[in-house]
Amino acid sequence: MAQRVVKPKTNLGPGFWPVTAFIAVLSAVMVYLIESMPLPIGLIQAGAPADSIDALFRFLGAVAAVIFNIVVIYTVYFGIVFARPKGAPANTIGVQIHDAPVLEFWWTAIPTILVVILSIYSVKIWADLQNSQGDVLTIEAIGYQYGFQFRYPKLDKPIDEMHLQLNVPTTIHVTSRDVIHGFWIPELRMKADMVPGLINTIRVTPTVPGTYHIICSEFCGVAHSTMRHDVVIESQQNFAKWFARQGGSSGGGGGGTIPIAQGKVDLGQKLFGQKCSACHSVGPFDQKQVGPGLGKIFNDPAHPKLVNNDPVTPQNVAKIIQTGYQGDMGVMPSAQVNQLSNPDIANLVAYLASLSKK
Ligand code: CUA
């Protein structure tokens, strides 16, 4: 007589249906909250594509919440209901169930369907972003250690601050001059890698005026955390005024006279700690971090000239801080990028001069 496989009776335990109802209600509440609540980090949506990215993010969150509830709550429930009875031997094994084709079909089919839906949804958003028509403004953004430069058509010089026009679809081509950086504008939910030799394209349409941050989102060196510039979203009139100012000006960074005689050593020392010490030591020239040591800058027979070949004078030191430097020694951002005012520069020069006297 052939041995018959006896199928054990399926036993879901006494509370299975109430627990299932609880999962359904809890999931419904969570999905409602995920879809309706403002994002907890308080990031506004400053333009397209922030809304479609947020919608995708919420959808992913809702799906994840439902799966989480099903997996975790049933696991805990079955763990309790089918725990080894008190007094049963330690090696007691529960009922073994093999071959459940219906179950196996569904636990394969449901995740497959979910993943396909998510893929189609994300690819559709991505395609919309890449194929948006009628871009009016095209900007190049170039990352470097440690800052961003922006090139606008009809401006000869790259500039340090990005301006965007309200309601004007804009294409941004991003790349890098040295290592891989990340170009990220959280309020627009837009992010792209800045890779040397490669141009990545993102498209945005700003809708909320304001000043936001562009943040480097790839670790790119010791001053990675300082790699943060402003992006100004403004009306077309204000943009036109700003643009005319950029076109009219020449010469590097900030500009204007620096009140060197009024520099204060103690203020300069404090600033040095905040703005310079990530890259410069106060030791001799050869004590390099990212840039040379600056402790003997005014009194170093081995280095009678600055790295830009200017003679070492307070005016020239002030100038190199103001305009920044790019050359054999590396890259130092301009005072505008470092957010140093002209009085700040005077204080730094006074501090450096005091070091060289010691
Ligand atoms: Cu550039 Cu981090």
Image (cartoon, rainbow, N blue to C red):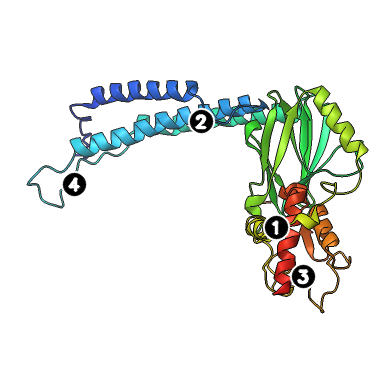
Q: Quadrant of the C terminus?
A: bottom right
Q: Which amino acid type is marked by label 4?
A: Ile
Instruction: For marks 1 and 3, give the one nearer the viewer.
Output: 1
Q: Secondary structure at mark 4?
A: loop
Q: Secondary structure at mark 2?
A: helix
Q: Residues within 10 Å of mark 4 (few under 14, many from 20)?
A: few
Q: Is residue 1 left or right of residue 155?
A: left
User: At x 63% / y 59%, what residue is drawn?
Assistant: 273
**What label does residue 60 carry, if any?**
2
Q: Quadrant of the N terminus?
A: top left
User: At x 63% / y 57%, what residue is drawn?
Assistant: 270
Q: Which amino acid type is marked by label 3?
A: Ile
**What label does residue 49 carry, if any?**
none
**What label does residue 264 carry, if any?**
1
Look at mark 3 in the image and give the residue it sits on: 297
Q: CA distance from mark 1 to mark 3?
A: 17 Å
Report if the CB atoms under discs 3 and 4 are less than 8 Å apart: no
**What label does residue 93 carry, if any?**
4
Report if the CB atoms under discs 4 and 2 are less than 8 Å apart: no
Q: Position of residue 4 (x, y in %)?
A: 22, 37
Q: CA distance from mark 4 to mark 1?
A: 80 Å
Q: CA distance from mark 2 to mark 1?
A: 55 Å
Question: Which of disc 3 and disc 1 is earlier in sequence?
Answer: 1
Q: CA distance from mark 4 to mark 2?
A: 38 Å
